[in-house]
Image: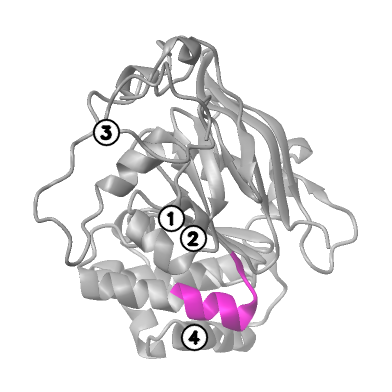
Amino acid sequence: MSALLKVSDLRVEYRGQPIVDGVDLALERGEAMGLAGESGCGKTTTALALMKLLPPALKQSGAVTLRPPGVEEPINVGRRTEAGMRRVRWRHVSLVFQGAMNSLDPVQRVDAQIAEAIRLHESAGAKEVRARIDELLTTVGLTPALGRRYAHQLSGGQRQRMMIALALACRPSLVIADEPTTALDVTIQAQVLQLLESLRERLGLALILISHDLGVLAETCDRIAIMYAGRIVETGPVSSVFEAPQHPYTKRLLDSLPVIGGPRALGDPIPGGPPDPGEMPEGCRFRPRCPYAADRCLSDPALRETSAGHASACHFAPWSEWPAAAGAGSLEAG
């Protein structure tokens, strides 16, 4: 079976500066993939590029191919005009935008916004649209009466569920959720994540979940991809990446997670910050912040497989063990 989504050498530039630089991804039907990394690493830009929603100032290149069920010819997103993409968005792939309060129209009732999405993409009468809206709201755990409210009349969790209902309005095969639990308290976060998981199983959705919270991705996803400075630096099954990370950046992110019953002291922070797109360091982009950096890190490491389905962009991978914090110049791949 062909992958539902295949991304090859995706690049996004702003005035010649790379924002997303050579991203490769593949997603099967019904699969959930997590996309993680610090703010500014290119996660949201990648999501917008998959749907060709980037502003004109950003230049996009590379191949993004969709193979939705029931569609004979694969959809090449890069070659689609804007009119052609309108027939793809929401019907085959949809996006749960970050920040529901900023994404919902404040002067329109929520059900009117869902109705607009359905009418734009399907030929449906008023009764059919009304029935679909009620069904969608029930599916995401809301009463249909809530659809007649404005966004400011809903709680944060209700708004987020409305955004998910809107994303499901035209029965897409792939949903991209960009930080869907941002600004929600932990109990509502859990409810939203459980909702996404149940919808994926019930409707056969494929899901790309974008988050800086690795704990969220561990609970929801089958595979995970770690981004840093516009590139994928590690990818693999969630269990493999969490149990045996093969990139120093991934390891430091995992070390920052609190462990129940573990030490009460905070882990060491990652020094410095991500590089400016216009001033990328020579070689490995994580080198200036990496405690294991060595001379060989002055050359750019390729993303390569270290075990079945698990790949890392680190010269020293696979790591059999992690030293405390010393230069890796004398270490060999495990």
Q: Name the element at disc 2.
A: helix
Q: Which mark's residue is nearer the viewer, 1 or 3?
A: 3
- Residue 18, label in figure: none
Q: Is residue 204 magenta?
A: yes
Query: In terms of sequence position, does the residue under pointer 2 or pointer 4 come before the other?
Result: 4
Question: Looking at the image, which is closer to me, 124 or 34?
Answer: 34
The CA span between labels 2 and 3 is 23 Å
- Where does label 4 land, which residue? 139
Estimate the spatial distance between the alpha carbons at disc 2 and disc 4, rounded to whole Å: 30 Å
Q: CA distance from mark 1 to mark 3?
A: 17 Å
Amino acid carrying mark 3 in the image: Ala
How far, Cα to Cα, is label 4 from label 1?
A: 35 Å
Three-letter code for the amino acid on which mark 4 is drawn: Thr
Residue identified by numbered label 1:
243
**On the image, which quarter does residue 181 sit in?**
bottom left
Query: Tags 3 and 4 in contact by the CB under 8 Å rule?
Result: no
The spot of residue 166 in percent (x, y) is 49, 69
Q: CA distance from mark 2 to mark 1?
A: 6 Å
SS type, badge 4: helix
Label 1 packing within 10 angstroms: few (<14), some (14-19), many (20+): few
Which residue: 70% across, 60% down?
A: 28
Residue 323 or residue 254, whichever sits in front? 323
In this rendering, the answer to whether 184 lies above or below 138 is above
Asked if one can make out residue 51 in the rendered structure from this viewpoint, the answer is no
Numbered tag placed on residue 324 in the rendering: 3
Residue 149, x across and y down, in percent: 31, 78
Residue type at tag 2: Ser
Q: Which residue is mark 2?
A: 239
Up-down relation of residue 134 to residue 322 (above or below): below
Q: Which residues are magenta?
A: 196-206
- Image point (48%, 75%), residue name: 197
